[in-house]
Image (tube, rainbow, N blue to C red):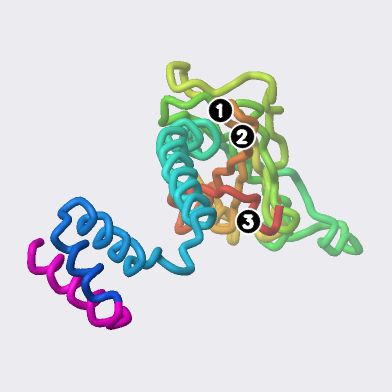
Amino acid sequence: MNVVLFILSLTFFISIDSNQTSLVYDSINDTDTTIITVSNLLDKNIEEPQNLDYHNLLTDCNILQFISILVAILIAIFPWVRNKFFRRPEIVIELEYHKGLSTNEGLSNKNDFSEKIIKNGNEILIFGLKWKYIIRIRNNSDILATYPKLHKPKVGIWFNSIEELNIYKPIRSSDNDLIIKCEYEKYTETKPSDRPKFVKFPVEFNDLKILLEYQNSAKIKFYTLFEFENLKSKNTFYFKKPKGF
């Protein structure tokens, strides 16, 4: 500090007029006056920072604080939002064979009735195949499924009859499986030797599709698509209604 004071004093001494040398010398000997003089010189040589925008600095700080608070809020409410709007019930569908039969419905109009007698074995008969099935609907999650609704495809195979689903009865995991009875039948006109064999599931069921629509507690719609590929149950879950229904 003494060196700094000496250099500053010397600089000041050189810069003044020679006629005032004795006055400067006296001021250097005066300690108080010297300190004041050097302090003033130091004040003059210290420049304030230039182009420092305190308003923008405060604004940037406020933005960072706002972003931090916003992130904290989002982290806090994310589980609630996910549970409320995005967690879906897991509803699965199964198709079970119940019973069926093969029937002889009599002579077909394809026979030639011009002859009074049709030889046995050459007649064309109408054979009926009738199936009864159970559609089993189960909630495999702890989330309540409300307003269930069945959709059939716009084009494709469907049941000849099916029980109506009560859309006002929710599907709970604690409840027994929801059972819907349905029937399918088809008829073939052929000779007795070509009578179709009865099987539990007709080959047409490879193209069978059943769409179940339901909602969670936030009224968000979800879908389960049941398909019977290779006569095996397949469930696919969707957030949007698939095309074709």
Secondary structure of the residue carrying tag 2 is strand
Quadrant for residue 42, please give it: bottom left
The part of the chain drawn in magenta is: 1-19
Q: Residues within 10 Å of mark 2 (few under 14, many from 20)?
A: many
Q: Which residue is mark 3?
A: 192
Q: Does the magenta segment cover residue 42?
A: no
Quarter of the rendering occupied by the N terminus = bottom left
Quadrant for residue 68, please give it: top left
Three-letter residue code for mark 2: Tyr
Nearer the observer, 215 or 202: 215
Q: Residues within 10 Å of mark 1 (few under 14, many from 20)?
A: many
Q: Which residue is mark 1?
A: 145
Q: Position of residue 239 (x, y in %)?
A: 57, 48
Q: Are marks 1 and 2 in contact (CB under 8 Å)?
A: yes
Q: Position of residue 17 (x, y in %)?
A: 32, 81
Distance, label 1 to label 2, CA atoms, is 6 Å
Q: Position of residue 70 (x, y in %)?
A: 48, 42
Secondary structure of the residue carrying tag 1 is loop
Residue at (88, 60) in percent of width and height: 113
Q: Is residue 239 above or below residue 165?
A: below
Quadrant for residue 8, please give it: bottom left
Residue at (71, 28) in percent of width and height: 164
Q: Which residue is mark 2?
A: 214
